[in-house]
Image (cartoon, rainbow, N blue to C red):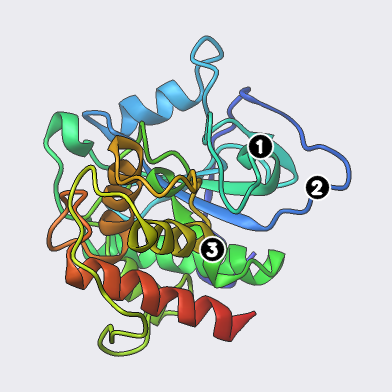
Amino acid sequence: MSKAIENIIWHPSPNFDAREAGTPVDMLVLHYTGMKTGAEAIERLCDPDAKVSAHYAVEEDGRIFALVKEEMRAWHAGVSCWRGAQNINARSVGIEIVNPGHEFGYRAFPAVQMAAVTVLAADIVARHAISARNVVGHSDVAPHRKEDPGELFDWQELARSGVGLWYRGEASASHKITPLASNDKGSAVSDLQEALKELGYDVVLDGHYGVALSSVIRAFQRHWRPSKVDGEADEETQAIIYALREEVRRLT
């Protein structure tokens, strides 16, 4: 553990089990707690009846609580998928970031909290050699049912610190952009679906811009185009998707 977080607070949760033998820890999943207070959230993460947990929780004042040892499987991702892997809990470390979330008054993450998350995340990805493309939000791995950590989380600043994936400079048109709208069908929709799947999203390659694709695009926007989260594949959103795909290809 990094010296910068050696004062971490051990607050054990009973909600964990053993990781599956032979499954590498190769993902970091970030969440927000989505409850009114941090104390309430930590209490729930340690309640055996709740059957949920995470490895860490980071309070708004920057305090870091360790709830489950990293060698064990915490129960944070639920039904989820990333890059074809469906048992995300088995291969990930989960961090819950205290924030009331969209239901209870979503707000910006304080600088001291972001600093603590950054130090903790950097330590985790370094120790487990987690690739940038596998640092994701709960909404990325469960786009049809989750919104966290949401569009106010500063993914770009985290990436500047060496944690997570971002595109280089301005998103350029590395791929021909075709205007798309809900219920469109055809090769342009298929191209977009294939690009999102290459990034890691669980996408059905059916060439149809339906509700499912819109949910994935909305999740993508929360992470990489937070200025407008509407599920619409406008020109800017598409340009960023293809720019990120080029970055993934460059790094692999």
> At which x and y percent is residue 242?
38, 74
Amino acid type at image mark 3: Glu
> At which x and y percent is residue 146?
35, 36
Q: Residue at x 28, y 87 (%)?
A: 172
> At which x and y percent is residue 62?
34, 56
Q: Earlier in the sequence, mark 2 or mark 3?
A: 2
Amino acid type at image mark 2: Thr
Instruction: Determine which residue is flagged by label 3.
Output: 198
Mark drawn on residue 23: 2
Q: Is residue 148 visible?
A: no
Mark drawn on residue 87: 1
Pointers 1 and 3 in contact (C-beta within 8 Å): no
Q: Earlier in the sequence, mark 2 or mark 1?
A: 2
Residue closest to the eye, 83 or 39? 83
Secondary structure under badge 3?
Answer: helix
Q: Quadrant of residue 189?
A: bottom left
Mark 2 or 3, closer to the camera: 3
